Image (cartoon, rainbow, N blue to C red):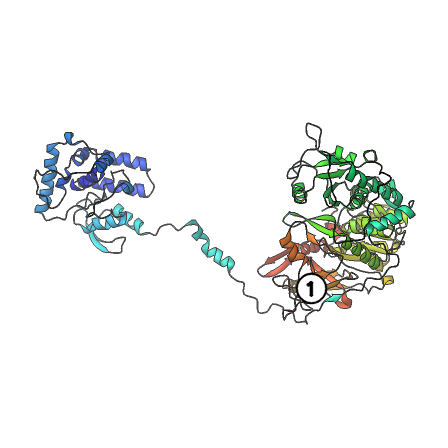
């Protein structure tokens, strides 16, 4: 092969020492990256330019050791395929006899001196790849660089093929090759540097740079032998008071609405306020019933697509209403229930690419929502496309927007009547929940659960007909929905809805309405109590003596106790009684978990726990003193709901029951909880179908429990204490901390001075 002939020819031609030195330095620069491959080839070709004619003119027959110098025997025949591969050799017609004789003379001289024949390594000048060359059977494969260098150093005279020559005149020194073999050779310092470079191991793969650190991260933390450990007995399942039997109790929430809408048509149901605090509209039970009927009839009979009804029973419908319009939301909610549709209340999207609304859109898409109900005023405020229609928000399915103002609703036919069925296990509504990662899921609540929850709240709070309730919370979800839209209708209560925009302008507005309407119950959050403290100096002629329950919806948060204590200190002189403050604990999955009852309803005295935060970080309950800074003071959230069973299980792994002095996740078994995450069977089974077990591995019940996501324990008098949430749990070096504790610590330091409204 031509390339092979070129390589052997270079080995056969002796090069001057200075050329070898230059070639060695050039290759060292290439190996160290000081020169590019193109520059290397260019300089090397320049060094060997005068020797190339000699190399290219060598007869292959002269390279074999058994050939006699000067022999005129022809070279062996070369196959056509091998000839076609030759790109660098000259044609036989242009071969110079002078060149041939010169090479033959050099070979004869080597034999006379009994020098070893040149290595059969390929020339670096040959650019054809090894893959295209099939060596003869009596030839070995070309050696690698380090092997060739060692072979070169073993010879007394440097070989041409290695292109790493050692100039004459250099002192001999003992070297160690890449194979660890000591050799004597005359080498320059750069050659030795090249040897040392070749001896160094290759750079490891990128992932190996992180192996050591990764192993350290995965190293199991050794427990501190002095860390506190739970020592109490295993806590058994705690059962709440049984649900009482109420005479003439409606078989469903819709049955209650039908009763009050037809027998108490003029009774006030809901009063809406504007941003100045003025009452703009009062919805009666008669109006709620008639408008809901109109909406249900219109949705089922007047909305069509291609001569087919747009909706059928069981379809999901989005409710898009602002926090300032509770009246139209209530009509839409009950209208969907009467039409056997499933309402999905959501927030009003602000912009087309709002990040939060994208997750809401994902929920709507997974629920198969095609229709959104809203008001004329709300629709006008939504972003519009050039066609004038509401834009399709990023991540949302394509929706049909339907305005439910009176002029758009049709009067039901005389022979049309809704089917008011008893409460069943079918889904009544879907409540959205946003997790700490930002994802949004939909929690389904059945008609039976909705009715049982209203029953349990009525019994725990002692609700009665015609009571007035002031609601400061969002009426579309959680406690604002449960108390202000559902349980209130069950008991024919009058709700005063305080819009959030009014609270920002006048933080005392809810207290003023309690005083004005002589409200018996108020549902607030600790932030609302805190804001009112900042503004209470502006008005002193208010009285809270009418309140029998002040429900603190976020009473499970550790910082709520400071707001409750400060609020009581200020307003106790204005008629507020200490036993009126009733913190509660709830979650989207388990609905209301526990609530403190007033003493008139048979509730035990309020409880307070001062706990060591160091022990809490190990999941252990140890009572401490308030004088220390490293303590967490929490208040009880009352007793568990009527008709429910509760237990506390370990946070990680199998849900084993906790010990009495151990913090765990609160689990509830009740007919008044959510039923599933819509469309998510995997996490539904883990959360809504948990089976707590004893230390011996025996199930505590044949009924599944619902995980609440609340971390706490059961204290004296069967009072429930919550110290954090699973979503806010942070584990650092084997110790647990809760994000809520950071807020509680900040608020514990003179909240009136350091914590500002809305921060």
Q: Is residue 244 left or right of residue 172?
A: right
Mark 1 — residue? 648
Which residue is nearer to you in this view: 634 or 669? 669
Above or below residue 218? Residue 301 is: above
In the current view of this chain or complex, which residue is farthest to the top? 386
Say if residue 738 shows up in the picture.
no
The N terminus - image quarter: top left
Q: Tell me residue 296's x, y (percent).
A: 80, 41
Left or right of residue 595: residue 263: right
Tell me which residue sits at (89%, 44%) in the image: 286
Q: Residues within 10 Å of mark 1 (few under 14, many from 20)?
A: many
Q: Quadrant of residue 82?
A: top left
The image quadrant of residue 608 is bottom right
Of residues 365 and 736, the one nearer the viewer is 365
Residue 45 location (% of width, % of height): 24, 34
Q: Position of residue 248 (x, y in %)?
A: 88, 56
> Measured along the vertical axis of the image, is residue 674 above or below residue 336?
below
Q: Is residue 320 above or below residue 213?
A: above
Asked if residue 88 shows in the view, the reply is yes
Q: How many marks do you count on the picture?
A: 1
Image spot of residue 748 (x, y percent): 72, 56
Give the residue displayed 44% in from the left and 51% down from the top.
207
Q: Nearer the viewer, residue 588 or 105?
A: 588
Identify which residue, 488 or 179, lies in the foreground. Answer: 488
């Amino acid at each position: 092969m031509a390339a092979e002939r070129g390589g052997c020819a270079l080995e056969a031609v002796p090069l001057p020492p200075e050329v070898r030195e230059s070639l060695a330095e050039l290759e060292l620069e290439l190996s160290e990256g000081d020169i590019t491959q193109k520059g290397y080839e260019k300089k090397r070709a320049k060094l060997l330019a005068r020797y190339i004619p000699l190399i290219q003119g060598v007869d292959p027959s002269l390279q074999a050791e058994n050939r006699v110098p000067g022999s005129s025997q022809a070279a062996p025949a070369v196959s056509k395929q091998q000839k076609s591969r030759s790109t660098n050799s000259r044609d036989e017609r242009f071969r110079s006899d002078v060149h041939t004789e010169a090479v033959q003379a050099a070979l004869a001289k080597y034999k006379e001196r009994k020098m070893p024949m040149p290595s059969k390594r390929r020339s670096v000048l040959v650019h054809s790849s090894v893959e295209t060359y099939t060596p003869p059977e009596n030839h070995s494969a070309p050696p690698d660089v380090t092997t060739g260098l060692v072979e070169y150093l073993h010879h007394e005279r440097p070989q041409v093929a290695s292109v790493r020559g050692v100039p004459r005149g250099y002192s001999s020194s003992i070297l160690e090759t890449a194979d660890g073999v000591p050799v004597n050779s005359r080498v320059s310092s750069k050659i030795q540097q090249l040897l040392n470079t070749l001896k160094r191991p290759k750079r490891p793969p990128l992932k190996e740079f992180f192996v050591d650190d990764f192993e350290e991260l995965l190293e199991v933390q050794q427990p501190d032998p002095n860390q506190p450990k739970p020592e109490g007995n295993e806590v058994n399942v705690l059962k709440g008071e049984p649900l009482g039997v109420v005479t003439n109790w409606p078989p469903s929430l819709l049955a209650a609405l039908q009763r009050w809408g037809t027998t108490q048509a003029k009774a006030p149901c809901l009063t809406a306020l504007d941003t100045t605090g003025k009452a703009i509209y009062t919805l009666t039970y008669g109006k709620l019933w008639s408008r809901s009927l109109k909406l249900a009839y219109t949705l089922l009979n007047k909305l069509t697509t291609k001569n087919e009804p747009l909706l059928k029973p069981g379809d999901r419908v989005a409710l898009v209403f602002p926090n300032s319009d509770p009246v139209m939301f209530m009509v839409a909610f009950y209208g969907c229930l009467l039409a056997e549709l499933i309402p999905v209340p959501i927030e009003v999207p602000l912009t087309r690419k709002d990040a939060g609304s994208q997750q809401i859109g994902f929920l709507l898409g997974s629920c198969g929502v095609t229709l959104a109900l809203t008001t004329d005023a709300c629709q006008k405020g939504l972003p519009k496309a050039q066609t004038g229609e509401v834009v399709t928000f990023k991540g949302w399915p394509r929706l049909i927007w339907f305005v439910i103002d009176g002029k758009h609703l049709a009067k039901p036919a005389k022979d049309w009547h809704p089917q008011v069925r008893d409460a069943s296990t079918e889904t009544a509504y879907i409540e959205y929940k946003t997790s700490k990662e930002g994802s949004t899921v939909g929690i389904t609540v059945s008609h039976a659960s909705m009715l049982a929850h209203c029953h349990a709240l009525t019994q725990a709070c002692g609700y009665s007909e015609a009571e007035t309730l002031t609601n400061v919370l969002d009426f579309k979800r959680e406690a604002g929905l449960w108390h202000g839209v559902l349980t209130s209708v069950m008991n024919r209560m009058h709700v005063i809805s305080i819009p959030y925009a009014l609270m920002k302008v006048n933080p005392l507005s809810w207290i003023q309405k309690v005083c004005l309407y002589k409200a018996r119950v108020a549902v607030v959050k600790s932030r609302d109590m805190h804001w009112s403290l900042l503004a209470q100096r502006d008005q002193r002629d208010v009285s809270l003596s009418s309140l029998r329950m002040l429900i603190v919806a976020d009473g499970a948060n550790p910082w709520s106790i400071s707001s409750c204590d400060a609020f009581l200190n200020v307003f106790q002189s204005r008629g507020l009684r200490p036993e009126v403050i009733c913190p509660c604990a709830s979650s989207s999955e388990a609905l209301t978990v526990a609530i403190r009852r007033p003493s008139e309803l048979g509730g035990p005295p309020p409880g307070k726990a001062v706990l060591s935060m160091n022990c809490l970080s190990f999941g252990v309950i140890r009572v401490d003193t308030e004088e220390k800074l490293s303590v967490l003071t929490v208040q009880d959230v009352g007793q568990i709901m009527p008709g429910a069973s509760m237990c506390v299980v370990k946070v990680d792994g199998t849900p084993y029951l906790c010990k009495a002095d151990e913090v765990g996740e609160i689990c509830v078994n009740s007919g008044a909880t959510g039923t599933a995450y819509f469309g998510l069977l995997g996490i539904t089974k883990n959360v809504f179908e948990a089976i707590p077990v004893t230390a011996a591995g025996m199930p505590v019940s044949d009924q599944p429990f619902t995980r609440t996501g609340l971390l706490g324990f059961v204290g004296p008098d069967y009072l429930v204490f919550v110290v954090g949430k699973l979503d806010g749990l942070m584990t650092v070096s084997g110790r647990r901390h809760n994000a809520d504790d950071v807020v509680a610590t900040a608020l514990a330091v003179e909240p009136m001075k350091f914590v500002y409204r809305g921060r």
